[in-house]
Image (cartoon, rainbow, N blue to C red):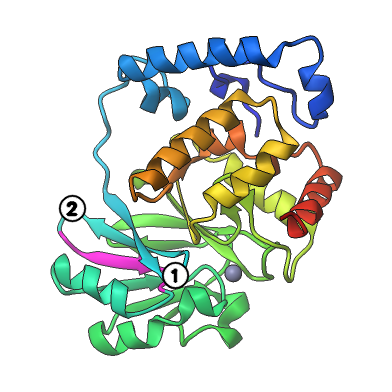
Amino acid sequence: MANPQHGKPGQARPKRGQPPAQQARGQPARRRGVEFGQAMDFLSHTGRYRYFRAGLAWPPDKAPSMALTATPIPCLSDNYAWLLRAADGRLAVCDPAEDAPVAAAVEAMGGKLDLILLTHHHGDHVAGVPGLVARYGAKVVGAAADKHRLPPLDQALAPGDRVDVLGSTAEVLASDGHTRGHIAYHIADSRILLCGDTLFSLGCGRLLEGNAEQMFASLAALAALPGETLVCCGHEYTESNARFAITVEPDNAALWARIAEAKAQRAAGKPTLPSTIASERAANPFVRAADVATLARIRAAKDTFR
Ligand SMILES: [Zn+2]
């Protein structure tokens, strides 16, 4: 999970599970902050920041052709449905919380929706399904384990299954913890992860039905995906997650960099998502938790954090 290859140059990377006080010992934070800022200036001036953040080598390899693109569609107060578009223009959507904003995006992109993917049963992930099915006749796929509490499924999926998404293949990953029966979809040829309410940028889902052991396993599986994988999650929680995350790892330079990036994105009226798996491995304290007990402790602390 914590692959040293993905560490950042010039960054004092704390060991996983090491208490923050120990990380800080003997390292004057102010001086290191200046050095880090200078490094970031260099990276942004040379255009390398994007590669630096994704943990990719510089110079970049020839960009691979992406089969699908993923666009966040804001729904409700802070949800995102993810609109997937194939090179031939076909469309799919993951977790439509509402039908109207998704339909507006579909109309702007050709007026045809082929497929709806669901990660879990919560209303703010499925409420748009009936309207979109009525309007477009889209096929619906979701977890077999949640079949009894999801809208009617055309295909019920189990972890390990592979499902066709507009000509690309999505692998279905077990993703329990937030709910029982939660699944995630990894579309390897497009470097897309649809992870619902399991992994957020700088956070993870609340343990509403599952336990910390399940969430730890789910996060470990997602963190093991390639670093450049795009984290397409269900909520714009990054800034509020950041306020808690920095109390857990106050000396994590990658976390400070991600916070600065998220603030700039929100100030520009943009989503902070997708994030990348490499970024979450470097900056997300829930992904970086060394063991189940640590994850359980910080998840419980976040539940009451204000
Ligand atoms: Zn949920």
Q: Which residue is mark 1?
A: 95
Residue 248 position in % (x across, y down):
74, 37
Place residue 220 in its image quadrant: top right
Picture layout, residue 133 above or below residue 25: below
Position of the N terminus, as image quadrant, is top right
Q: Which of the two residues, 207 or 154, is positioned nearer the viewer here?
A: 207
Q: Secondary structure at mark 1?
A: loop
Q: In this rendering, is residue 107 above or below 186?
A: below
If the image is split into quadrants, where does the C terminus sit?
bottom right
Residue 255 in sight: yes
| Mark 2, secondary structure of its residue | loop
Residue pictured at 48% horizontal, 86% vertical = 151
Q: Real-space Cα distance between discs 2 and 1?
A: 21 Å
Q: Let me know if residue 93 is in the magenta part.
A: yes
Q: Earlier in the sequence, mark 2 or mark 1?
A: 2
- For residue 87, the mark is 2
Whole-percent x, y for residue 156 in the image: 50, 76
- Residue visible at 28% across and 51% down in the picture: 69
Q: Amino acid at mark 2?
A: Ala
> Which stretch appears magenta?
89-96
| Disc 2 versus disc 1: nearer the observer | 1
With respect to residue 176, does 280 lie above or below? above
Q: Measured from the top left, where is residue 38 in percent x and y?
A: 47, 11
Q: Is residue 280 left or right of residue 106?
A: right
